[in-house]
């Protein structure tokens, strides 16, 4: 076959690019990340959490939940006091109704309700915007519904933080280690330059345990399988009115809030 | 030589930079770690021969790390027991970081960034 | 041709050394950031993108503005731009270089940047941004260099250059459409969630970029033998004028939607930027400066008598540039993060290290620009074609 040098080089170049592209996992995960604009998950297991704020009464009730997570995950809780509060790292925290549901307020909520605190965490959405935008798939959706964070792959671009409509994500602006109060030797710390957030305690789930916050909540936080019609979370949701954060955005969160009603009568 | 002054000056700077590691480390002693005692054919975690573990642990750990974090497959059997594919809860539950990792890595001048996040209790944070 | 950059007069070398020194300061400060983390900047958990990303956003527009010369000259044979096109293409190269540097310094784990290409993620707009920016840089440096080299040899450029030039036209539009999509597709940030975001980016790019190009062309005319000519500069000025009118119009459209609908989520960002919320008003003086500069620029650009006067044109171009730099930089990016998702305000202001790194990258960009312009001008001076016929 007669071929001149130019044609050969062009052919070789195209072949090289083609082989190079096929060596990457370019289209893996595309379907998972961008599909499902209407349907709810039909997987065997879809982890979810129902938070019944009626069962959280004292400051101690609220703090116990946050402390459980902070301790086992080596969260650098000393940043606000010893470092710069702007660099705060938090996976679960408590905030008022007005801050938790800023678009669902009315002026005539009972005073007792306006003071009520709500535990806030990553919602592990069914259609997570953070997963859609991550350029390296460092944040990805597991088949069981958990939006997981791969700290090894994260490049720290913080696009996920811009995309998350709930402010659930924290970035390690500084080395977190000097700001960890009590270290847990069974879990790593993170390093500066990566994003982190609640992982629904996937490391505990894989050992058959409950998430630390749910375990410490004395029944206020109920964790279970949303796709099992007999699970406790489904039973609670069937018999109570529940709220979700920013439902109009189509993210389909996996965290539900049961707020009650007549308990706040003043 | 045309522009000879600049060329000679450039050459001297280049040689000084390239031989930097050699003359800054002259005279220092480095203790070579003792030969490991376990035989290379002995099987280790995951039924991987120790010789292969030594030679390929970087790739094996890389694979494990994706299997644990991205696949959720956290456990591996060895000698009938279940172990976690985890530095802190697996390797370091039997081995000491300094004796096991540090000895060879320090001698070879290798500084893997595993320890930016993972840590051993003996060294603290 | 690069050897032309190694021979120059006193003014040239002074400029190069000053820019190199400023770049060096930026690099040294960046080493501090690598050591201590992005905590040395003013960013926070609430305002997670700041000065670096805002500079990238602005410069992507400047980079794309080369297309405002390429379309008239190559598609419509507008001969007047014959001398200016190379300046536009080389400005695009410098601007895209700065964009990529700003993205690099903003990353928390820059050593892992290859992950973007090792694990390509087509559903992520940032992946496409990295791809189109790299492609645009390659396109412009190739086209600019090949056409300049052909000019030096006295021949027509090789046949493969023309298709690349035609490709660079939609590619230029793509680089800042993709950048606009970074913002415009995020649910929950109402300040950004607007269809007109990409159109606004286009309008501000086609006014800010050519404005800078006019200023650069006038500086070049003053300091070298290269004179692009009066009419090409006027043609560019017309482009700046109409693009700036469109840009201001689009911003007013956004203001109308926010305030006529009276939806708090849409109004809050404007409240923060132009009036302050609860005493948090760090950006208010800056934003009103942007408004005044925009109005002033239109006053100087729209009437033909003013636009024709090159002294007034300089003031107009400077005010256009300042207005857009503030609007697309501080206004757009910070406005999306304040107030945060909980309705509270965390303010942002760049720190000194952050500003030094930013200044360092701008210096690197201008250094690249200086070197490329020096090559182009020297080639033309030697050919005796430095003066335009227009």
Image (cartoon, grey):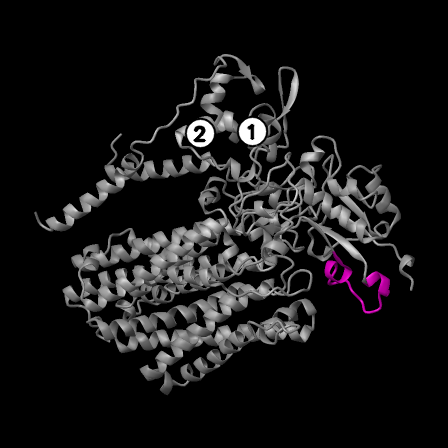
Q: Quadrant of residue B14?
A: top left
Q: In which quarter of the image is the N terminus of chain C?
A: bottom left
Q: Quick check: can you spot residue C1?
A: no
Disc 2 to disc 1, C-alpha distance: 20 Å
Q: Nearer the viewer, mark 2 or mark 1?
A: 2
Determine the image quadrant of residue C276: bottom right
| Residue A107 lies in the magenta-colored region | yes
Few, some or many residues within 10 Å of mark 2 (<14, 14–19, 20+): some
Q: Mark 2 lies on which chain?
A: B
The residue at which mark 2 appears reads as B105
Which residue is pictured at 85% across the width and 37% down the height?
A: A230
How far across and down, in percent of the image, does residue B99 sit? 50, 25
Residue A69 image point, x, y percent:
70, 44
Foreground of the two, A70 or A11: A70
**Callout 2 secondary element:** helix
Task: Give the structural element (helix, strand or loop) at label 1.
Answer: helix
Q: What stretch is highlighted in magenta?
A: A95-114
Q: Nearer the viewer, residue B58 or C70?
A: B58
Left or right of A96 in this view: C271: left
x and y percent of residue A143 in the render?
A: 67, 37
- In the rendered image, the residue lying farthest to the left is B1
Front-most of B109 and A1? B109
Q: Is residue C324 above or below residue C152?
A: below
Residue C13, label in figure: none
Q: From the viewer's perspective, is A169 left or right of A230? A: left
What is the x, y in percent for residue C390? 24, 76
The residue where tag 1 is placed is B64
- One can see residue A155 in this view: yes
């Amino acid at each position: 076959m007669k071929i001149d040098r130019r044609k050969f080089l062009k052919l070789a170049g195209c072949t090289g690019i083609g082989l190079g592209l096929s060596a990457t996992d370019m289209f893996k995960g595309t379907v998972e990340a961008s599909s499902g604009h209407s349907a709810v998950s039909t997987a065997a297991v879809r982890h979810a959490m129902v938070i019944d704020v009626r069962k959280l009464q004292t400051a101690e009730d609220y703090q116990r939940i946050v402390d459980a997570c902070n301790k086992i995950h080596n969260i650098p809780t000393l940043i606000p006091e010893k470092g710069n509060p702007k660099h705060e790292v938090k996976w679960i925290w408590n905030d008022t109704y007005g801050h938790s549901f800023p678009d669902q307020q009315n002026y005539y909520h009972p005073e007792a309700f306006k003071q009520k605190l709500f535990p806030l965490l990553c919602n592990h959405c069914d259609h997570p915007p953070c997963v859609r935008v991550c350029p390296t798939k460092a944040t990805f959706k597991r088949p069981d519904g958990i939006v997981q964070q791969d700290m090894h792959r994260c490049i720290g671009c913080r696009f996920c933080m811009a995309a998350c409509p709930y402010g659930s994500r924290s970035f390690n602006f500084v080395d977190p280690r000097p700001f960890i109060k009590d270290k847990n030797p069974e879990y790593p710390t993170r390093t500066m330059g990566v994003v982190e957030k609640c992982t629904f305690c996937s490391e505990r789930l894989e050992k058959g345990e409950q998430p630390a916050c749910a375990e410490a909540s004395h029944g206020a936080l109920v964790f279970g399988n949303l796709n099992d019609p007999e699970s406790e979370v489904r039973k609670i949701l069937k018999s109570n009115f529940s709220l979700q954060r920013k439902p109009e955005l189509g993210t389909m969160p996996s965290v539900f809030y049961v707020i009650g009603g007549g308990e706040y009568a003043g | 030589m045309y522009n000879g002054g600049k060329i000679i000056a450039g050459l001297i700077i280049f040689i000084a930079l390239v031989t930097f590691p050699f003359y800054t480390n002259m005279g220092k002693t480095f203790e070579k770690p003792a030969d490991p005692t376990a035989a290379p054919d002995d099987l280790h975690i995951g039924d991987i021969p120790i010789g292969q573990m030594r030679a390929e642990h970087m790739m094996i750990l890389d694979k494990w790390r994706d299997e644990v974090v991205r696949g959720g497959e956290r456990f591996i059997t060895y000698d009938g027991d279940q172990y976690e594919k985890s530095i802190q809860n697996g390797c370091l539950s039997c081995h000491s970081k300094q004796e096991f990792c540090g000895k060879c890595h320090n001698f070879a001048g290798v500084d893997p960034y595993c320890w930016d996040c993972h840590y051993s209790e003996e060294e603290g944070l | 041709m690069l050897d032309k950059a190694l021979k120059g007069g006193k003014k040239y070398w002074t400029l190069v050394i000053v820019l190199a020194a400023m770049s060096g300061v930026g690099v040294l400060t960046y080493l501090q950031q690598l050591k201590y983390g992005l905590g040395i900047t003013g960013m926070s958990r609430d305002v997670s993108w700041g000065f670096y990303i805002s500079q990238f956003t602005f410069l992507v527009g400047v980079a794309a503005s080369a297309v405002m010369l390429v379309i008239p000259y190559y598609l419509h044979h507008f001969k007047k731009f014959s001398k200016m096109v190379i300046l536009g293409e080389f400005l695009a190269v410098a601007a895209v270089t700065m964009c990529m540097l700003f993205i690099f310094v903003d990353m928390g784990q820059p050593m892992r940047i290859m992950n973007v290409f090792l694990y390509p993620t087509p559903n992520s707009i940032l992946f496409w941004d990295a791809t189109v920016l790299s492609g645009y840089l390659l396109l412009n440096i190739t086209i600019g260099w090949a056409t300049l080299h052909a000019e030096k040899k006295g021949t027509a450029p090789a046949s493969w250059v023309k298709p690349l030039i035609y490709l660079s036209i939609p590619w230029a539009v793509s680089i800042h459409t993709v950048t606009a999509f970074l913002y415009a597709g995020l649910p929950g940030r109402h300040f950004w969630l607007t269809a007109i975001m990409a159109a606004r980016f286009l309008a501000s790019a086609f006014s800010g970029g050519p404005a800078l190009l006019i200023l650069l062309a006038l500086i070049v005319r003053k300091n070298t033998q290269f004179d692009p000519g009066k009419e090409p500069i006027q043609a560019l000025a017309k482009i700046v004028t109409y693009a700036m009118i469109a840009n201001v119009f689009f911003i007013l459209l956004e203001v109308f939607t926010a305030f006529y609908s009276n939806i708090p989520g849409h109004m809050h960002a404007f409240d923060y930027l132009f009036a302050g919320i609860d005493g948090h008003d760090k950006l208010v003086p800056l934003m009103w400066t942007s408004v005044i500069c925009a109005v002033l620029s239109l006053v100087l650009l729209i009437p033909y008598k003013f636009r024709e006067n090159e002294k007034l044109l300089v003031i107009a171009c400077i005010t256009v540039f300042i207005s857009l730099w503030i609007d697309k930089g501080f206004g757009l990016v910070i406005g999306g993060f304040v107030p945060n998702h909980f309705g509270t305000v965390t303010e942002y202001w760049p720190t000194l290290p952050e500003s030094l790194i930013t200044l360092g990258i701008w210096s690197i960009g201008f250094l690249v620009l200086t070197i490329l312009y020096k090559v182009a001008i020297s080639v033309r001076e030697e050919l005796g074609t430095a003066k335009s016929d227009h």
